[in-house]
Image: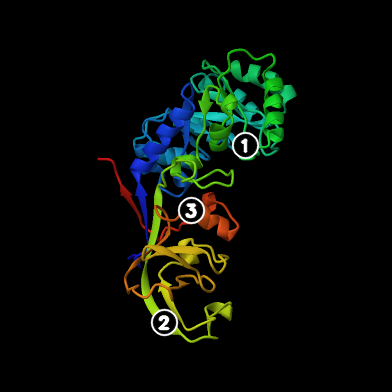
Amino acid sequence: MSRGACATIHAQALTTNLARVRELAPNSRIWAAIKADAYGHGAIDAARALRDADGFALASLGEARQLRDAGVEKPLILLEGTVDIEQARQAIELDCATVVHQADQLAQLESLGPRVQQQPLWLKVDTGMHRLGVAPDVAAEYWQRLSALSDHPVGLLSHFAAADDLDPTATEAQLAAFERAERGIDNAPVSLANSAGILAWPQSHRDWVRPGIMLYGASPGFDKTGLDLGLAPAMTVTAPVIAIREVPAGDRVGYGGRWRAERPSRIATIAMGYGDGYPRHAPDGTPVWLGGQRVPLAGKVSMDMLTVDVTDLPKVQLGESAELWGAHLSVDEVAQQMGTVGYELLTRVSSRVPRQWRHLD
């Protein structure tokens, strides 16, 4: 049974943010990224809320099977491809487009022969991020071999390393590398833009865009929050106040006594800790929304609880709901205080925090 913590997911926010992508990239089709359980929101429900997307982008075959078992029929793409020939067979059975980014994946598909004929294939080009992809100077050779296998036009994609940096140097270098890769390739569908690319680099939109974090109302960077970028936050994480303590000046709070009361203080304990996914390394002063205002974290986060200074909030009551992030407090602002990114906070909310979806219908 839940201790009262809850992650409320707003389906309307996802549809609003998807519409924002359509507005920014009106001539592109959309792979909506719902990998990592839709960035912690719940992949099956997210797929339903994002049903107007043209397809869904995933990281693994297991994610694809989950969606197919739930009746999701939209096109799916495996962004990392498959790891062995058995997975390659399963991707065909699940009707998944698959990405090829290295030689052994190409060899596995070639060994499957005619079974690949109806499978959409994409070739990933390493334009400078150096995680996955073939070098630009061999892209045409790989593309031609893949084109011999599939009846579908074989697509080309890459991934930006610094699209959230408005200094154009890195992104323009990647775009130039991609242009080199396209030489000798005709009529290939192209996908380059992630959320940051969609927001800042319209020349990268091409045939398909791949929004991820912006669909969930958080920011990909630019030193701005999702709210600053006109996005609607999809997840609101709340937990109740379970205790209130009067702490004399000079006393310390929490493990190791990191926080010291500089004045007679009131400390509220909230049923949220690192066991729920709230990072243990959150520093004192990290904001929490309570009683209509920001209150500061006071002391180290425990496994099941955290403590906040409510000295200036005398009317706070037991059972009152605190917002860790959401509609009043941007996940991006909270993440920045912790020295991390909104992506991490959203995806690390643990399974013991129930997701409650508020659907459109």
Q: Which of these two is toward me, 25 or 229?
A: 229
Residue under label 1: 163
Image spot of residue 281 (x, y percent): 58, 65
Dot 1: few (<14), some (14–19), or many (≥20) neighbours within 10 Å?
Answer: many
Residue under label 2: 245
Tag 1–tag 3 contact (CB < 8 Å) = no
Amino acid on which disc 3 is placed = Val
Q: CA distance from mark 3 to mark 2?
A: 27 Å
Q: CA distance from mark 1 to mark 2?
A: 47 Å
Which residue lies at the image location 54% right of the left edge and 52% below the top edge? Answer: 344
Query: Which mark sits nearer the N-terminus, 1 or 3?
Result: 1
Query: Which mark sits nearer the N-terminus, 3 or 2?
Result: 2
Image spot of residue 214 (x, y percent): 48, 40
Question: The residue tagged with tag 1: helix, strand or loop?
Answer: loop
Q: Is residue 343 left or right of residue 164?
A: left
Query: Which mark sits nearer the N-terminus, 1 or 2?
Result: 1
- In the displayed structure, 162 sits above or below 190; it is below
Which residue lies at the image location 52% right of the left edge and 64% below the top edge? Answer: 286
Quadrant for residue 161, please give it: top right
Residue under label 3: 331
Tag 3–tag 2 contact (CB < 8 Å) = no
Determine if residue 95 is in view. Answer: no
Task: Look at the image and tell me in which quarter the C terminus lies.
Answer: top left
